Image: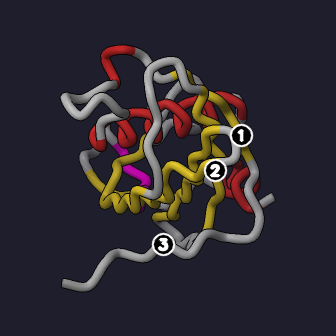
């Protein structure tokens, strides 16, 4: 079986840190693979918030939907570890973009990940164009 490979962009535009909670630990005694996705969502939420948006459903009247996700696990993390997460935006189209995540703990790489994000008009129940103001913010 071919392994997923994620090539990270050269430039990251946002960074945050999240502590590994006891509820993030799996039966193997380390950070659970599913918890990486939750940390990615939290980092994405904080990124949108840093741009002035309340959440992922209030981006100039539009929202987002996660269309896909890929994670490549690189190392373990444990209860109390601080995970540093960098975000980058790439592959912007009229209606979608990719968010890349690079997760570290100290000098140790924890994971590389990507989510495909599609703009969505929740009132009309359909995919929509990326609002111009938001587009300008994520292209910088």
Where residue 22 appears, x then y in whole percent?
36, 14
Where residue 56 appears, x then y in whole percent?
47, 35
In this picture, is 60 found above or below 80? Answer: below
* Residue 7 picture quarter: bottom right
Q: Nearer the viewer, residue 2 or 132?
A: 2
Q: Nearer the viewer, residue 70 or 57?
A: 70
* Residue 91 picture quarter: bottom right
Say which label, 3 or 2, has the lower sequence index: 3
Q: Report the residue at 61% width, 48% height from top.
A: 108
For the residues labelled 3 and 2, the Cα–Cα distance comes to: 13 Å
Q: Main secondary structure of the magenta part?
A: strand
* Residue 46 picture quarter: top right
Say which label, 1 or 3, has the lower sequence index: 3
Taking the magenta stretch, the answer to whether it contains residue 103 is no
Name, please, the residue furthest toward the front.
29
Q: Dot 3, crowdedness within 10 Å: few (<14), some or many (≥20)?
A: some
Q: Quadrant of the C terminus?
A: bottom right
Q: Report the residue at 72% width, 44% height from top.
A: 14
In this picture, is 12 found above or below 106? Answer: below
For the residues labelled 2 and 1, the Cα–Cα distance comes to: 6 Å
Q: Report the residue at 30% width, 36% height from top.
A: 32
Q: Secondary structure at mark 2?
A: strand
Residue tagged 2: 87
Say which label, 2 or 1, has the lower sequence index: 1
Residue tagged 1: 15
Q: Are marks 2 and 1 in contact (CB under 8 Å)?
A: yes
Q: Secondary structure at mark 1?
A: strand
Magenta part of the chain: 116-121
In this picture, is 117 found above or below 86? Answer: below
Residue tagged 3: 6
For the residues labelled 1 and 3, the Cα–Cα distance comes to: 19 Å
């Amino acid at each position: 079986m071919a392994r997923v490979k994620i090539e990270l962009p050269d430039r990251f535009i946002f960074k945050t840190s999240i502590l590994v909670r006891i509820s993030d630990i799996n039966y193997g005694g380390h950070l659970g693979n599913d918890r990486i996705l939750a940390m990615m969502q939290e980092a994405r939420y904080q990124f949108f918030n840093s741009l002035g948006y309340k959440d992922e459903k209030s981006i100039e009247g539009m929202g987002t939907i996660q269309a896909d996700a890929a994670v490549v696990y690189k190392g373990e993390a444990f209860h109390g570890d601080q995970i540093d997460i960098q975000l980058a935006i790439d592959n912007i189209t009229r209606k979608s973009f990719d968010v890349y995540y690079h997760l570290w703990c100290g000098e140790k790489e924890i994971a590389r990940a990507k989510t495909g994000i599609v703009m969505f008009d929740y009132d009309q129940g359909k995919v929509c164009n990326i609002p111009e103001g938001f587009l300008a913010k994520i292209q910088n």
